[in-house]
Amino acid sequence: MLVYYKFGIGWLIFASLIFIGCDRAVDPSARRQSPDNFQKISTGESNPTSTFSPAKLIKVDVETASLSYLSEQKQYKGTTQPQKQVSWRSQTEGTLLELSVEVGDRVSRGQIIGKLDDRILQTDVAGKTGELIALESELAQAGIQVKNAQIKLEETEIQLQQAKSEALRYQDLAKTGLIAQQQAESFKTAAKIAEKALLTAREAVKLEEQAVEIVRGRITTQRSAIAESKQRQAYSQIIAPIDGIAIAVPKDPGSLVRPGEEVITIGDFSQIKIVVPLSELDLGQVNVGQRVKVKLDAFADRQFFGKINRISPTTNPLSRQIPLEILIDNPNNLLKGGLLARVNFASTTESHVIVPERAIISEGDLNYIFTVAKHNGDKTSKVTKRRVTTGERANGKVEIIAGISPGERYVLRSSQPLKDRDLVGLSILSQ
């Protein structure tokens, strides 16, 4: 009996010690907290001593508004080349005596940059000039012959007149019986002979005049031959046809150059030309003079702008593509030929803020979007419900005509429905 009594007393002492320890562990200020204060904490109302648990905040994905175009802009590839490219090809045969230009050198139009051996051409010109002098002498002689024939013609005309007069006079005498009729007939015959002599003299004049024309024609031909030879001689001088930069020099001094062979190629790099193959489906979206964006892999950190200069009037029947020529100003010769170019055709419509359709909240005929203020250090922020005016929709995106500006942030999606002025937590995917 005594044993059970002692055992019960021990358990009572142990239980008392546990109760006293728990009572001391409770913060005295917590025991003094009023029921009202407890209610504020439990409902999440703000007070100086309350804090929010990040786990209880609405999580949102945030994007930054920027200007863009609703329709996707296609990219076309092309290669840069000089606006104009001209090859100087020889029009005569000769040895290349000198060429003062190398690849990369700048030349001006009309500048003499080289010379072919023209000694054979000089000899040819001299020979043909001598032949011309001989022909001119022959022409002078032919002229004298014409004059002689004309004098002969005049004499024959006088003789004919005299013969006719004599024939008439003797015919009258024969009628009166003063002379015999046979004698009168002889004078008549002499007049007929004079007429034939006149015809012959006239033909002689014509023949001499024709001879003069033939010589004159030969002189004209000879002068043309001399001019041609002199022109070939002038071709021995290599003259720059345009302003530009030498981009190819396939011949070296001492080389034999034949007609048609290239000696130098010059490119005008004041503007850069890019030709891209445009799909016939996009033909209605481009116009001559339209501004385009150009990216060059060689200048990845820069963007260039050009204009559509020419649209081919024909389409490739196999690829159904249309060559499109674009020009870019190149005043400092920064851009070179042969660079890979990526061309984007700027939309003809005005750019707007473009957002995904899921970011828009529709209430009847009105549309809203939640904008996000600058977040606090703990990645929390307040949202504002803002009315927006929307435009066209396509491919899951919508134009914002008014209500949000580029650079502002908006809620793309949230973990639960939002209300104006809600405090939210930004996800790690937010911009």
Image (cartoon, grey):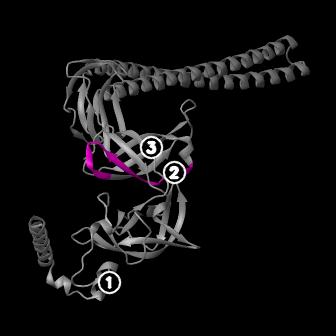
Pick the front one: 30 or 201? 30
Tell me the amino acid under the disc marked 3. Answer: Glu
Mark 1 vs 2, N-terminal side: 1
Mark 1 vs 3, N-terminal side: 1
* Snapshot quadrant of residue 175: top right
Q: Residue at x 40, y 22 (%)?
A: 132
Using the image, tell me which numbered label, if any, was put on residue 254: none
Tell me the amino acid under the disc marked 1. Answer: Gln
Position of 298 relative to 237 (above/below) = below
Q: Which residue is mark 3?
A: 325
Q: Residue at x 46, y 24 (%)?
A: 219
Looking at the image, residue 163 sits to the left or right of residue 21; the answer is right
Q: Which residues are magenta?
A: 284-303
Can residue 143 be seen by looking at this rendering? Answer: no
Q: Which residue is mark 1?
A: 39
Looking at the image, residue 190 sits to the left or right of residue 206; the answer is right
Position of 189 relative to 116 (above/below) = above
Tell me the amino acid under the disc marked 2. Answer: Val
- Nearest to viewer (mark 3 / mark 2): 2
Pick the front one: 353 or 385? 385
Residue 333, image x, y percentages? 25, 47
- Nearest to viewer (mark 1 / mark 3): 1
Q: Which residue is mark 2?
A: 286
